[in-house]
C-alpha cells in the first residue's frame, strides 16, 4: 500500500540513517514508502521545505541539524513538546495544507535511556553540553523524567540561559560557563548535545566532571559520536552510549504520527547496531 512521500531535512544529511529506519518500519506493515534525504542550504531552508510539501503526496518530514528551531518557526500549529522547547524535529502536513510541528527528541532519548539501557534517571545530577535544537527538546524530558539537577553549559551562554529560564525551575535547571568545566564538580549523567562531532570540530573536554559511575550519552551516532565516546572511555565513564537508539525511537514516534501505527523498534535498532558496531 502506498503511504505517501516523506523526507528528512538537514545540512549535512548524506550520513542519515532515517531513510533506512523508516523503510524498515514500513516493511513491518506492508507499506510502500517514498522517503528521501534533502540537503537544504541554510538560507533556503524555509523555501525548500515549502517546495517539498507542495508536492502531491508529501505528508511528513523529519528535521535535523541545524534546522530544528527554523522548523518550529515554519509551523502553523505545534505540539506541546514543540512549544516548550521552541524546536521541532518532525513536520506534518495537515488535511487543510497547514504544517504541524512536533518534537519527539526528548521522549525518544528518555525511552532509549530508561527502557533500552535500563537507566533510572530519577535523582541523577545531569550535565548537558550544548543548548541547540536537540538539547532544547531533551532538557525538558530529563526534568520530566526526574533528574535531580540539570546543568546546561553552552559555548554561547545566552542560549543556555534562555533554555534554563524557559524550564523555569532554578533549583533544578541552571547554567554554568563553558570555562567552568574544569571546576564544575562531578555528574552521573553527561549528555553531549553539541554539533562538534557531526561537523568535525574539536571537542576539548576535561575529565574531572565525570563521576565514578557516570553515564555518558551522545545524542549523535556513528562518526558524529566517535569523538565524545572516545573521550568518555578515557574518562573512565561507567556506561557509554551513543544516540542510535534515540534516533530509532524518535523515528518511531514520527512514524506513528504519520501512519497511525506503532512500529517495533528493537529489531531495527539491533540490525543497525550490528552494522555500525
Image (tube, helix red, strand yellow):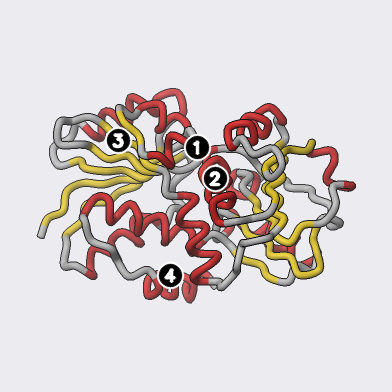
Contact between marks 2 and 1 (CB within 8 A): the answer is yes
- Residue on which disc 2 sits: 140
Badge number at residue 269 = 4
State how far apart marks 2 and 1 are (Cα). Answer: 7 Å
How crowded pointer 1 is (Cα within 10 Å; few <14, some 14-19, many 20+) is rated as many
Relative to 13, 211 lies left or right: right
Q: Earlier in the sequence, mark 3 or mark 2?
A: 3
Q: Earlier in the sequence, mark 4 or mark 3?
A: 3
Q: Earlier in the sequence, mark 1 or mark 4?
A: 1
In terms of depth relative to the viewer, which is nearer, 98 or 31?
Answer: 98
Q: Earlier in the sequence, mark 2 or mark 1?
A: 1
Q: In terms of image quadrants, where is residue 166?
A: top right
State how far apart marks 4 and 2 are (Cα). Answer: 24 Å
Look at the picture and state if 157 lies above or below 60.
Answer: above
In terms of depth relative to the viewer, which is nearer, 254 or 166?
Answer: 166
Q: Secondary structure at mark 3?
A: strand
State how far apart marks 1 and 4 are (Cα). Answer: 26 Å
Q: Secondary structure at mark 2?
A: helix
- Residue on which disc 1 sits: 85
Q: Earlier in the sequence, mark 1 or mark 3?
A: 1
Q: Secondary structure at mark 1?
A: helix
In terms of depth relative to the viewer, which is nearer, 200 or 49?
Answer: 49
Mark 3 vs mark 2: give the one in front: 2
Q: In terms of image quadrants, where is residue 231?
A: bottom right
Mark 1 vs mark 4: give the one in front: 1
State how far apart marks 1 and 3 are (Cα). Answer: 15 Å
Residue farthest to the left, as pictured: 1
Q: In terms of image quadrants, where is residue 155?
A: top right
How crowded pointer 4 is (Cα within 10 Å; few <14, some 14-19, many 20+) is rated as some
- Residue on which disc 3 sits: 100
Q: Secondary structure at mark 4?
A: helix
Amino acid at each position: 500500500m502506498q503511504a505517501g512521500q516523506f523526507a528528512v531535512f538537514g545540512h549535512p544529511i548524506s550520513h542519515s540513517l532515517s531513510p533506512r529506519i523508516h523503510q524498515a518500519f514500513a516493511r513491518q506493515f506492508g507499506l510502500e514508502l517514498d522517503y528521501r534525504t534533502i540537503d537544504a542550504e541554510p538560507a533556503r531552508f524555509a523555501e525548500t521545505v515549502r517546495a517539498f510539501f507542495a508536492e502531491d503526496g508529501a505528508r511528513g518530514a523529519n528535521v535535523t541539524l541545524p534546522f530544528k528551531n527554523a522548523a518550529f518557526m515554519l509551523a502553523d500549529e505545534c505540539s506541546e513538546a514543540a512549544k516548550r522547547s521552541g524546536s521541532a524535529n518532525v513536520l506534518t502536513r495537515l488535511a487543510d495544507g497547514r504544517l504541524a510541528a512536533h518534537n519527539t527528541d526528548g521522549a525518544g532519548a528518555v525511552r532509549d535511556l530508561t527502557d533500552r539501557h535500563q537507566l533510572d534517571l530519577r535523582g541523577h545530577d545531569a550535565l548537558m553540553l550544548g543548548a541547540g535544537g536537540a538539547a532544547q527538546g531533551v532538557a525538558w524530558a530529563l526534568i520530566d523524567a526526574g533528574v535531580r539537577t540539570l546543568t546546561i553549559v553552552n559555548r554561547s551562554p545566552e542560549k543556555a540561559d534562555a533554555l534554563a529560564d524557559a524550564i523555569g525551575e532554578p533549583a533544578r535547571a541552571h547554567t554554568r560557563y563553558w570555562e567552568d568545566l574544569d571546576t564544575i564538580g562531578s555528574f552521573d549523567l553527561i549528555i553531549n548535545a553539541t554539533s562538534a562531532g557531526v561537523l568535525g570540530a574539536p571537542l576539548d573536554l576535561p575529565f574531572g566532571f565525570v563521576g565514578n559511575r557516570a553515564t555518558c550519552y551522545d545524542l549523535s551516532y556513528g562518526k558524529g559520536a566517535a569523538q565524545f565516546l572516545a573521550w568518555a572511555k578515557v574518562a573512565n565513564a561507567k556506561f557509554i552510549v551513543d544516540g542510535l537508539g534515540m534516533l530509532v525511537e524518535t523515528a518511531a514516534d514520527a512514524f506513528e504520527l504519520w501512519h497511525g501505527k506503532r512500529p517495533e523498534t528493537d529489531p531495527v535498532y539491533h540490525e543497525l547496531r550490528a552494522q555500525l558496531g
